[in-house]
Amino acid sequence: GWGIQVGAFGAREEASRAADAAREKLPKELAHAQALPPQAQSGGAVHRARLGNLSEQQARLACRKLVQGNQPCFVFQVN
């Protein structure tokens, strides 16, 4: 599957809020997206805000729309 990342934050709660905000901005495009648990990157200082359970096309469309609205976003493939 595919997903999008909409930010990386110092606090887990901030990452969760960012993922929720992206879903609110694109309720139709992200209707079936699932918030992935914020994951700390190496060192544990940064938590990634991610939504998964998307097709590649859904992820790319959502990111394109979010970026047009000045929201950082990139597409990733779920392992």
Image (cartoon, rainbow, N blue to C red):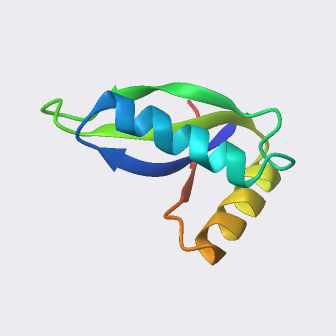
Residue plotted at (49% across, 64% down)? 72
Q: Is residue 77 visible?
A: no
Q: Count the labels in the image.
A: 0
| In-image side of 34 versus 36 (left or right) | right
Residue plotted at (69% across, 69% down)? 64
Q: Is residue 35 visible?
A: yes
Find residue 66 and report its horizontal and vertical position in percent: 64, 64
Residue 26 against residue 48 in the figure, above or below: below
Single out the residue that lies furthest toward the left. Answer: 43
Residue plotted at (48% across, 38% down)? 17
Residue 56 against residue 31 in the figure, above or below: below
Residue plotted at (16% across, 36% down)? 45
Find residue 54 and report its horizontal and vertical position in percent: 75, 39
Quadrant assignment for the N terminus: top right
Single out the residue that lies furthest toward the right. Answer: 28
Q: Quadrant of residue 51?
A: top right
In this view, the residue in front, 75 or 63, is 63
Find residue 16 and report its horizontal and vertical position in percent: 47, 32
| In-image side of 77 versus 53 (left or right) | left
Residue 51 against residue 68 in the figure, above or below: above
In this view, the residue in front, 55 or 33, is 33
Quadrant assignment for the C terminus: top right
Find residue 33 and report its horizontal and vertical position in percent: 73, 34
